[in-house]
Amino acid sequence: MSNNLLANKRGIIFGALDEQSIAWHVAEKCVSQGARIVLTNAPVALRMGKIQELSSRLNAPLIGADATSLEDLENLLSQSMEILGGKLDFILHSIGMSLNVRKGKTYTDLNYEFLQKTYDISAISFHKLMQSALKMDAMEEWGSILALTYIAAQRVFPDYNDMADAKALLESIGRSFGYHFGTQKKVRVNTISQSPTMTTAGSGVKGFSEFFGYADKMSPLGNAPAENCANYCVAMFSDLTRMVTMQNLYHDGGFSAMGMNPAILNLNQ
Ligand code: NAI
């Protein structure tokens, strides 16, 4: 159902890789709510081809950008403003990657070059994006910027590895930049802490499917699906949430507030 919550709004969506990606759902929902968007992903992801299909279906131009490259980000921001015909109302950062996770390095045996890459791709890219957008005056007043994160930033989930530290940095960057963007341009910056979700990035984590089931049982509402996360993003991009900024917002079916759920232990209630 569309309420046209994003009518006349322009935005950029990072990180749609395939139909499982959270950003894929966000792109679909934003367009169905009346927004016009540009899709972007790393050049290597563009070559895989699936995002092209989304781009043509949503009539959303596709611009390649490595989120760690300032040059690519500046090109993306200026081209998007040109194509969409004005400054941006919203941006979704939906990017995460750890070579330590990919190559099976454990948290007590990290490769530090990989660690730098994890931070650069998964967290510092958020700073680079916002610094570029601020310098280029690319955001409309009362615009909204979101990044997706995970509760491993606050609690220990051993197999989440160096991504936990990257998420802590990402959330801190959201808060710190939120101050500057809010004061200077009345732009809000938030992070959404999402339930485990079956995607390429998610299922790269060791033991992910068992953990997915655990989180589902622990959460009174169950795990939040990607489609619901997309609805939450739409709400955060809309004018209905103008005064919410510098927050880490849990979208997790209640998981973050639980200590113990009898369902996990198969106890009768
Ligand atoms: P995904 O694998 O579909 O998306 C990750 C995206 O990051 C991909 O599109 C990939 O191409 C992009 N990316 C990687 N390196 C890049 C670079 N250098 N420049 C530009 N883009 C780059 O997986 P998912 O799960 O949709 O991930 C999206 C976000 O949601 C990530 O920040 C992830 O950490 C977060 N998240 C995921 C959860 C899950 O369980 N799947 C739970 C909570 C948060």
Image (cartoon, rainbow, N blue to C red):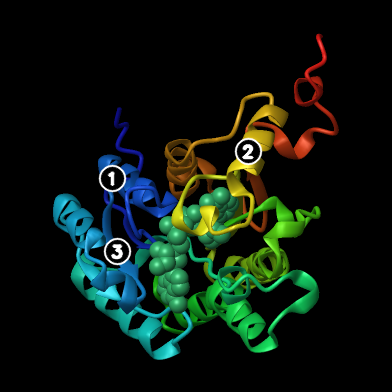
Task: Tell me how far mark 1 sits from mark 2, CA to CA.
Answer: 28 Å
Q: Residue at x 78, y 55 (%)?
A: 154
Q: Which mark is in front, 1 or 2?
A: 2
Mark seen at residue 7: 1
Report the side of 136 relative to 62 (left or right).
right
**Residue type at the position of mark 2:** Asp
In this picture, is 199 found above or below 253? Answer: below
**To which quarter of the image does residue 148 belong?**
bottom right
**Residue type at the position of mark 1:** Ala
Residue of label 3: 39
* Image quarter (top left, top right, bottom left or bottom right) of the N terminus: top left
Q: Which mark is in front, 1 or 3?
A: 3
Residue of label 2: 252
Q: Is residue 251 visible?
A: no
Q: How far across and down, in percent of the image, does residue 211 sit?
A: 66, 43
Q: Helix or strand or loop: what does disc 1 sit on?
A: loop
Report the side of 260 relative to 239 (left or right).
right
